[in-house]
Amino acid sequence: MHYQPRPEDVRFLLNAVLDAPTRLRALAPFSEVDDALQSQVLEEAARFVGEVIAPLNREGDEVGCRFDGGEVVTPPGFREAYQAFVDGGWPALSAATEDGGQGLPTVLEAILYEWLSAANHGFTMAPGLLHGAYACLKHHGSDELKDRYLQKIATGEWLATMCLTEAHAGSDLGQVRTRATAQADGSVRVSGGKIFISGGEHDLTPNIVHLVLCRLPDAPAGPKGLSLALVPKVLPDGARNAVHCERIEEKMGLHGSPTCTMRFDDATGWLVGEPGRGLAAMFVMMNAARLHVALQGIGLLDAAWQKADAYAAERRQMRAPGPVPASRGSEAADLIAEHPAVRRILDTQRAWIDGSRALAYRSALMLDIATHDADAKARERAQRWCSLVTPVLKAACTHQAFHGASECLQVFGGHGYVREWGVEQVVRDARVTMIYEGTNEIQAIDLLVRKVLPDGGAALSAVLLELRDTLDASREADADVQRRLAQLRYLGTTVAMAAHANPVLPYEVADDFLRVMTLTLMAWAWARIEVAAPADAGRTHAAAAFRRWVLPEFEMRLGIVKRACEGVALAHAAQAPQEASR
């Protein structure tokens, strides 16, 4: 069974829950992007993904990429599919029209990449960094670099990589040793090695644009001394640059994507942005990538859920407890979809899919508002949302992709553990999303230590108050969400106070704090979904599963953080008399 996008599910969230058409038309670049145009784009995207990309998924996993003498050969059909992807204008969906793009809203690009990841994660890794590379070069590149490379990247004619990681420098980029030496003609010569580079070498495009984090000779140690260089595989004069792929990794999953070890031997490149400001330029790319990784998680979970849901609607085993199901007929056994244990799994994963989509699509809308809204305060509010919610989505959606896909595998029993049904591939492919673009632990630290604590929780409080204002306290579900929003606001203040006494505490409870915020946002999302679709049976079951099987974790995680803060307060109180007596 190939993955099949369901545009109707997406349109419901965009139109009924998020009021996306109205909000987008209020932005000057999208004044003519009405519901009909959005629906047409989504229908065509669903057709392309379902008919062209999804059928290549299994062979991409089984055959994988082949490394031969420094060259990488992608799986059968990938080159032709990628060319069809470019010819259809899909890489350029949200790029500016002056750069060869279609100038459509970010949320449509987000949905496209969610579907692509669900259909064929390995293939999607190839164009997955185009949006970030485009944004990075557009904001920080010189006019000369933009003239030479921006349109090629925007249209997908040339693919791009993000070269950060080194063998000794993973999350700690301040240890990067790759060197860049300035030349008289304004270029730089880049030397060093990078590992775990997705698409560092392949046969999909004639050129690959590498964005390489490096250090100039006079740069200070640490992250503030890093610069960013654009280093192409093929130079403007057509000569091959001194960029080499030494090997591709043998991985748990993502066999359709070459993960490369790269070597730069005095390779020619050009700085992107100012010297020593490489991380600032790179994080334009990283932040865009993190939302897309969250969408990968949603898509992969949806792929696993579709397989499990279809299997449960066909497989019969034993008699289900409770009332006789209408599907029994004269059969000796009931569909496993009628068994409560299986129903709980399916409805719970559906709850995560729909709730996460609502939050991710809202974030994509906020990216467009932050860029295009004429009101400075609206732009500020949108940027605040994106800053706080992006790490939450990256961590939560990828966590659920792996663990939820494993639950979906359980629906198949032993059949899920063999290759025939394809769900085991989803589990393997999903695991890396919890690691790359910043591990989920780093996302939690980023949220609490860098986003919440510096202002004492003021930005978090502002976001939560905005969500509160969308709710109706007369509805029981909305009143419950308002209570949780208030608890999260108070928790942010509590941790901020405790951190003054014990600066290590936030690092210990960051994961728990992120889960509290995740569940609060999900509760808000489901409150809005239920208002928009009060009579939808599938969503009613998912909403009930969310409240019964997912939301109770809120109290547990809240209690963990509160008790940790109380422990700090007690230790501080006990220490104060001792210090006074000295």
Image (spheres, helix red, strand yellow):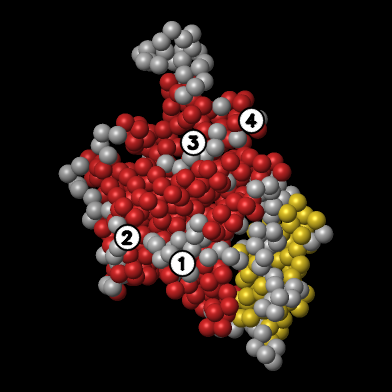
Element assignment for label 4 = helix
Residue under label 2? 33
At 71% from the left and 84% from the top, the residue drawn is 181
Residue 445 % position (x, y): 51, 60
Residue 101 — which label?
A: 1
Residue under label 4? 420
**Precedes in sequence: disc 2 or disc 1:** 2
**Precedes in sequence: disc 1 or disc 4:** 1
At 58% from the left and 35% from the top, the residue drawn is 423
At 30% from the left and 63% from the top, the residue drawn is 32
Q: Identity of the amino acid at label 4?
A: Glu
Q: Nearer the viewer, mark 1 or mark 3?
A: 1
**Precedes in sequence: disc 3 or disc 4:** 3
Residue 285 % position (x, y): 53, 67
* Residue 192 visible from this viewpoint: no
Q: Are marks 1 and 4 in contact (CB under 8 Å)?
A: no
Mark 3: few, some, or many residues within 10 Å (few <14, many ≥20)? many
Total label count?
4
Element assignment for label 3 = helix
